[in-house]
């Protein structure tokens, strides 16, 4: 049987979108319980995970730059010497805390209510240029990579956890995987919106300039 999904609602209403994603991925209350059960296993490792993530982001100039062009509320650290020591600085430890808080929140959330969906969506939105003064404007390529990298770090901890039977481990790894694909969608929906806007403004410019050439 074919179930009807309202395309317009999926693209305009977060709850409808989440319901469709959940049905497609078979994300159920069992997955939420599995995530909640992961929390006590992962919590002691979160500082190491956050540190590993930032070391990764700081190991490439293309990702490191974002932390020095967007530092609202922090004192400016623009010299190269500052940049080299900044991984251990107070502002970096605050940023690591943000990632720790994010992980703690998604793992302990018992009810995926509208407030929580808004939170997941807001995390995605702020990384685009769509969130006004809180926008970070990170290119999506890095988001995709970090989601993959972070997921590997979490799976690694679960895989090595003792006193868990195979069925429980599988349920936990599967729940983590679904969480990451849902969060990924809550990033991409904002990025796609930006792309659509960029495309329509390009179309407008090309109409305005009456250009007849495809390549200059
Ligand atoms: C797995 C994907 C990612 C997740 C889950 C994530 C999560 C977060 C969260 C929860 C915050 C804090 C939001 C708040 O203010 O409440 C944040 C801020 C930030 N993220 Fe991400 N992020 C991701 C990927 C990235 C990537 C790939 C970059 C850069 C290459 C990046 C750069 C930043 C920056 C610059 C901030 C702002 C920090 C500040 O306020 O100075 N994020 N992120």
Image (cartoon, rainbow, N blue to C red):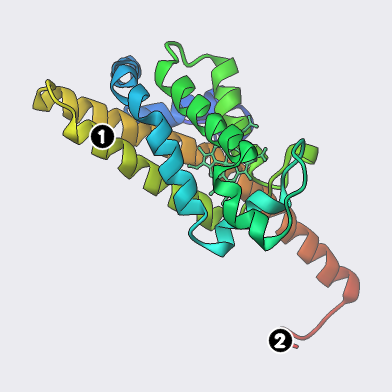
Q: Quadrant of residue 150?
A: top left
Residue 175 at x, y percent in the picture: 30, 28
The N terminus, quarter of image: top left
Q: Is residue 151 above or below residue 45?
A: below
Q: Which image quadrant for residue 78?
A: bottom right
> Up-down: is 27 above or below 133?
above
Question: Whole-percent x and y of residue 93?
Answer: 56, 35
Looking at the image, which residue is at 51% across and 33% down?
A: 99
Q: Nearer the viewer, residue 212 or 198?
A: 198
Q: Residue visible at 54% across and 30% down?
A: 97
Residue 43 in view = yes
Can residue 1 be seen here? The reply is: no
Q: Does residue 157 appear left or right of residue 29 in this picture?
A: left
Looking at the image, is 134 positioned above or below residue 115? below
| Residue assigned mark 2 | 215
Label 1 or label 2, whichever comes before in sequence order: 1
User: Of helix, strand and loop, which one carries label 1?
Assistant: helix
Residue at 36%, 23% (x, y): give it.
Answer: 43
What number is the disc on residue 157? 1
Alpha carbon separation for disc pair 1 and 2: 51 Å
Quick one: SS at disc 2?
Answer: loop
Residue at far right of view: 208
Seen from the viewer's position, the closer of residues 78 and 11 is: 78
Residues 97 and 213: in front is 97
- Label 1 crowd (10 A; few <14 / some 14-19 / many >=20): some
Q: Is residue 90 shown left or right of residue 100?
A: right
Mark 1 against mark 2, which lies toward the viewer?
1
The picture quadrant for ligand 1 comes to top right
């Amino acid at each position: 049987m074919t179930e009807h999904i309202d395309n317009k609602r999926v693209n305009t209403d977060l709850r409808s979108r989440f319901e469709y994603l959940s049905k497609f991925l078979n994300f159920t209350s069992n997955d939420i319980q599995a995530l909640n059960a992961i929390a006590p296993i992962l919590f002691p490792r979160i500082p190491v995970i956050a540190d590993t993530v930032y070391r990764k982001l700081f190991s490439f100039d293309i990702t490191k730059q974002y932390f020095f062009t967007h530092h609202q509320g922090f004192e400016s650290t623009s010299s190269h010497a500052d940049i080299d020591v900044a991984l251990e600085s107070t502002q970096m430890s605050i940023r690591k805390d943000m990632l720790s808080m994010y992980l703690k929140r998604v793992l302990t959330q018992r009810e995926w209510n509208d407030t929580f969906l808004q939170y997941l969506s807001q995390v995605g939105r702020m990384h685009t240029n769509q969130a006004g003064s809180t926008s970070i404007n990170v290119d999506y390529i890095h988001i995709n990579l970090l989601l993959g990298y972070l997921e590997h770090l979490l799976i690694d901890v679960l895989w090595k956890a003792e006193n868990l039977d195979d069925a429980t481990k599988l349920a936990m790894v599967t729940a983590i995987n679904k969480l990451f694909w849902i969060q990924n969608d809550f990033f991409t929906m904002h990025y796609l919106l930006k792309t659509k806007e960029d495309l329509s403004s390009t179309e407008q410019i090309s109409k305005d300039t009456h250009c007849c050439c495809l390549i200059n």
